[in-house]
Amino acid sequence: MKKKEMVTYSGEELMQMELPPVRFVVKDFLSQGLNILAGQAKAGKSWMMLDLCIKVAKGEKFFGFNTEKSTVLYLCLEDSLSRIRERVMKLTDMAPSNLHFAVMADNLSGELTKQIDSFIDKHPDTSLVVIDTLQKVRKVKGNMYAGDYKVISILKRLAERQGISIVCVHHTRKKSDKDPFNTVSGSTGITGAADNIYVLKKDDSCSDFAKLYIRGRDISERVLTLQFDDCRWVLMGESSVEDDSFMNDEAMLNLLSFLLRCVYKDIPFRSCAATCLYRLTV
């Protein structure tokens, strides 16, 4: 039996190859490949995805970022057609004809990839497929890491082969973590295989404010501050991960407050800690 040899490319050959650039469905925000949007239950993930689908289908800006107008497939597998129609009516006066919905689909162990391939054959300008939720299409048996990695890899290969962006809606664990990306439910096989990860985090489940933590291979790591207003998420601000970490570090904020009070009371920084504390209390 003839052995299959590995195909390699030299650095010079690689530099001379004509390769297509990374495709962005939403410029500098959502690129081609497999993406995960994770968040707490009932945090507003589906509202965000529906708004994204409508904006891409219409070619309108999403969070201020330009979109590529194209056909979109939204697999809303936890909703009914009635609920989807009500939500669409709250977000737009006219539903775009190039936005398609499905409330039932096969799983990844069955015919799901073939179903998506068939849809794209009929709609070759498709750029975005949203699967809401990932749990509805996967069946993990045995080793969780291996199972998670296999599921994500199947969808990742599909996205790469079709040149599209697939977004899987997923959940986060209840246990908190300083790194929001560590809260994504499941093993690291999910976050390790995905191209881009988005974590929607609300400090208070009743709050209208949230932060969207973004990390990926083709997009810059950053944090978006959002407000849920009139059934859609609205961008309120953007910051780096470092700035966000600083503003959420209680010890650093206490130190900053301490230093500011020292300045206000004209206490020289060369004073020992005990002297500073004493003078701050008098």
Image (tube, helix red, strand yellow):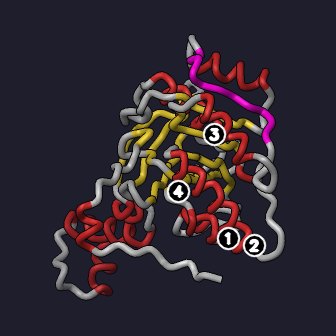
Instruction: Tell me the crowding category of disc 1: few under 14, some 14 to 19, or many 20 or more residues within 10 angstroms, Cα based.
Output: some
Give the residue drawn at x 43%, y 67%. Answer: 249
Disc 1 marks a residue whose amino acid type is Ser
Disc 3 marks a residue whose amino acid type is Gly
Q: CA distance from mark 2 to mark 1?
A: 6 Å
In percent of width and height, residue 109 lies at 80, 56
Q: Which residue is mark 3?
A: 44
**Lower position in the chain sequence, tag 2 or tag 1:** 2
Direction front: furthest residue: 1
In percent of width and height, residue 3 lies at 58, 82
**Lower position in the chain sequence, tag 4 or tag 3:** 3
In percent of width and height, residue 71 lies at 54, 28
Direction top: furthest residue: 93
Please report contact status of discs 4 and 1: CB closer than 8 Å, yes or no. no
Q: Which residue is mark 1?
A: 187
Residue at disc 1, secondary structure: loop
Please report contact status of discs 2 and 1: CB closer than 8 Å, yes or no. yes
| Stretch of the chain drawn in magenta | 95-105
Residue at disc 4, secondary structure: strand
Disc 4 marks a residue whose amino acid type is Ile
Q: Which residue is mark 4?
A: 197
Considering the whole magenta stretch, tell me its main secondary structure.
loop
**Lower position in the chain sequence, tag 4 or tag 2:** 2
